[in-house]
Amino acid sequence: MKTFQIILSAMLLFSLTTAAVAQSSVLRTPLQQQADKYEMKQSMLLQWSEGDIASAVQGLVAVGTGEVFGISKEQCQKIFDYERDPDIQSIHRELGRLSHETPGGAFAENASEETQKKYLDLRVELNNIRRKKANDIVNDILTPDQLKKIEEFQISTMDTSSLVSPGMFEVLNLSDDQREQLEEIKNKLKPEVEKQIDKIVEHQFFYQDKVNEAIGDSVKGVTDPADRLKIISEILQKFNEKYPGYVQGTTEFLESGRILSNNLKVEMFDVLTDEQWNRMIDLIDNPPDQVKKHFEIFRKIRDVNTSKDDDKWQPGPNSWKPGDPIPEGYRQQRSKRRFPGTDNQSE
């Protein structure tokens, strides 16, 4: 059940940071759905392959815990300023024009292939520009200390990530040789990761479609993240009662992702020196105060409608968060074996 809660929390964050959270997905045309799925796939693939500090920051701001990491209210307000960028606004206008070029626009049954291709290409371009602008503005307005805290947060909460990104380990001061090794691992496992991302996208869109239908206008005009999450949590409880088989299906779906994620972790962990490994373990077992505070706040919001004590995250090393980000047995295996080369051996 805790495994399900992990992805459930991630989906809630996705809902809160999506402008269309209160819109029914039935309003999306097949072309829009195709573009939405492609955008999500590319975003996840880029986030995995290159890392994406902006997504982590936006998620924290969306649930109201940005200030826990020292991000001021003024900085929080600027996080999404990139949406007003002239390049982004220009693409939005062009997408609007294409949508009305023929009766019904690019979404009409009689829309030309050329118009539909232009629309899809622009959606891809918009996604790429938004991602770049978002990362630029985050790196511009946050201090090195704030960025470090976010990077440490990503390591500490590794278990809540669908896929572990090589970029997450940068905070451990990687060498150029280690970066090359991680790049080789990334290229080797990329085909498997793409397949899993396809599954995640299809799964999440099915879930989001059903949830959006249930949400309707219930969060319209609700700006407080805690209030929005409370409303959505109540709806999700009813949703899970209505689709009891879906929860079981979710668990089965996540198993393939867990196996792939563990394979990624093991290969990447083997690249780390003992010093880096110990630093990573310390961030996981003894997370920084701001990480604990974030989950304390998030837990209170999430547990408003949860009555089972065994479903709550407990304080203390190895138990304050759900699950263990280190694959079972790996810690013991690593402590028993010596790595080739003097750089990976304990003094």
Image (cartoon, rainbow, N blue to C red):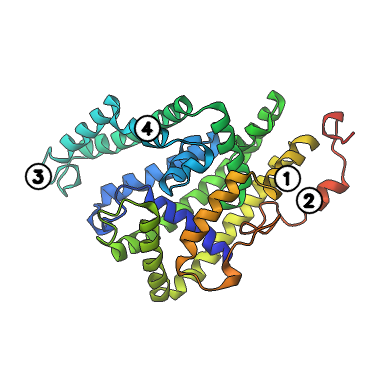
Residue at left 50%, top 55%?
298
Residue at left 14%, top 46%?
110
Q: Are marks 1 and 2 in contact (CB under 8 Å)?
A: yes
Label 3 sits on residue? 103
Residue at left 40%, top 55%?
226
Any mark on residue 331, and which?
A: 2
**Residue 327 appears at what percent x and percent y?**
70, 54
- Three-letter code for the amino acid on which mark 4 is drawn: Lys
Earlier sequence position, callout 3 versus callout 1: 3
**Residue 21 appears at what percent x and percent y?**
32, 53
Image quadrant in which you'd find residue 152: top right
Numbered disc 1: secondary structure: helix
Q: Quadrant of the N terminus?
A: bottom right
Residue at left 38%, top 42%?
39
Circle 1 or circle 4, nearest the eye: 4
Label 4 sits on residue? 78
